[in-house]
Image (cartoon, coloured by chain):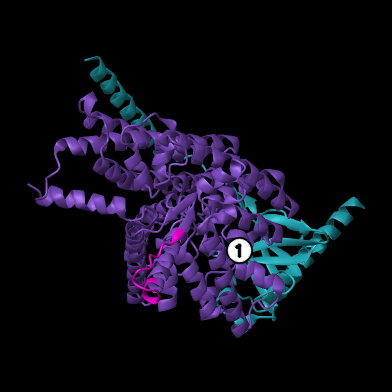
Chain colours: A cyan, B purple
Amino acid sequence: MKIAQIYKALLFGAASFFLAGIWCVGAEVVSIEELIAKSKTHDARVVTIEGEAVGHLMKRGDFTWLNVGDKGTCIGVWAENEKFEDVKYLGRYGQVGDLLCVTGTFNRECKIHGGDTDIHAQSVQVIASGYKRQHPEHPRKKKILSILIGVVACLYIIKIFRKRR
Amino acid sequence: MIFKPQLKDIKIIGFHLGKLTLGLGLWFLLPMACALVFHEPDAFLDFSISFVFSLCVGVLLNLVCVFPEKDTAIGWMHGMIAVALSWIVAMFLGAIPLWLSGHWASFLDACFDSMSGFATTGLVLARDIDHISYSCNLWRHLIMFIGGQGIVIVVLSLSNVASGSYSIYLGEARDERILPNLLQTARYIWLVSFVYLVLGSAALAFAMNHGGIPWVDAVFQGICIFMAGFDTGGFSPQSQSILYYHSFLVEIVCMVVMFFGAISFSVHYGLWTGNRKVLFKNSEVRALLLSIFILFVAVVIGFGQSGSYITANALFRKGFFHLLSGHVGAGFSTVYAQHFSSLWNPLSVFSIIIAMGMGGCVGSTTGAIKMLRISLAFKAFRSEIKRLMFSDSTVVVEKLNHIKTIVVEDKLVKNALMITLAFIVLYLAGAALGVYYGYSFQDSLFESVSASANVGLSAGITQPAMPTMLKVVYMFQMWIGRLEFIAVFVMVGFFISWLKGK
């Protein structure tokens, strides 16, 4: 019985992931850079963007703000709290955020949000999970530091020696 | 006849430069501690290298530039040159951890952001800011805090240098002695800054937490945003600047912090000592408020013509926020850089450019021409008209309230107009270079004024792919604009006399 439930859950998960993929592939994905550059063209239209969830999930009552970034350009996505339930990883130092596919209405100057450029999302799908990223210490940097410590020690010794003379 | 500087002069400058380098190097200890707290071993290594390297440079300069004890007194020329050079040294030292972090495409880009930080400009060439370490972010904002007070003031207030230090103080574009002793003045400036740091960071942290950011990040980003706002710098921990927060409350607190940063420390002193009237009696503050009002009307007319941001909420959050941010030289933004040219009406954009070009108050952390000089020029203009209108026997006296009531004299006006003219030439020269590289005049002027006036708002020109020459010119504009020309001119004169003198 339990195995059957696991299979069902796996099947459901795979189907959701597949449907989400179809949803994103079906809709024409616009880059965030293009949205910003051609704001007048896309204003008040339903658009689909793909990008990394960055920073924080900022809850405001029943709604949440999440900034989604792609190639260094980010845009604010505004939606009901439930729509962000699947978002687990948020992009920051040491972490790559979930890759999201967001479909919603693009607002060049949102009337509700004081003129912010944003997207009011109808759907938010996680198309690739984020992950922890290691920032290993560079061995060459350690060598450079050791050499510099040696140099500064020598300089101080010379300084002390000179003062005594 | 031009006198050739002697080896002794170079040694005096080098010796004091070494002391300043050692003083600056100590500031690396803060991001090192931050890296330990947030478990960022690679960033800790970057800052350790920078710290030890600055010690090496400082000690080496002190060893090489040795001269008799009795000659350590720093002269006028030495002070000015030490200041101009210390900003260059600070730029290089500050760029080391940025470059090592890997978020800057080249060392030049890291130097650009370092100069932008120290000069409290806020133009950014960093890539992928949203993934930068806490310690690196702290350093980016800390250099604004150090630069805003004045690099040399920082070292001055920590040491007991007394002889000749007034020339250093003047070299960093400050001329007010709030307290009788210069050392006391420097320490008072730090006291004010630290008290506001605590209050402002707390207010920002509360606003951010209210907007859904967890407490640890709210406090950290609150401190960062305060340092960038009060010192009218404009860096922010996230790539979208203040737009990231989508919060009216955060924007309001930012506006208050920016405005406080644009007011002279002598006015703060008046407020602290219970003289609340000083805020509204001061001619410069009044001129600033009047200018903000007039230019805001122009921005609103521009929005009306283009049909953008027409709701009261948007007018305030976009129009007023950017006008204030530009006027006081903070450079915080809640719109995308490209939108200034694609969505904003030219009238609104030119109003922002004029605001950026004028700047805040003398003796504050802002750059640009500054309102005291604008007021002086305006008073001189009015007095000339009066002189022409009235009879020859009439004596026209114009007065100005700046801490105390002063009579507008020709010498004061001449100095004010000289600096104003130098700024206008700098703005136009940078704009001409932008046009040469194929950018529109509006965007070129916007970016040039933003760099020279140490503002940080961008029309989209400043990015890693921009021409190298433009990067170098903007760095020069930030440097010379922050020091208000004199120290740099003295340094150039020193080198000329070294080459041509007898």
Quadrant housing residue B440 = bottom left
Figure check: B86 above or below B322: above
Task: Tell me where residue B356 appears, x and y as whole percent.
Answer: 48, 65
Is B43 in front, or is B381?
Answer: B381
Residue furthest to the top: A164
The magenta span reads B387-399
- Residue B393 lies left or right of residue B405; in this view the side is left
Task: Tell me where residue B216 appears, x and y as whole percent.
Answer: 68, 43
What amino acid type is highlighted by mark number 1? Gly
Residue furthest to the front: B393
Is residue A160 visible in this depiction of the protein? yes
User: Element under label 1?
Assistant: strand
Task: Tell me where residue A137 appears, x and y as whole percent.
Answer: 48, 39
* Label 1 Cα neighbours within 10 Å, binned few <14 / some 14-19 / many ≥20: many
For label 1, the residue is: A69
Residue furthest to the left: B502
Q: Chain of mark 1?
A: A
- Residue B453 lies left or right of residue A41; in this view the side is left
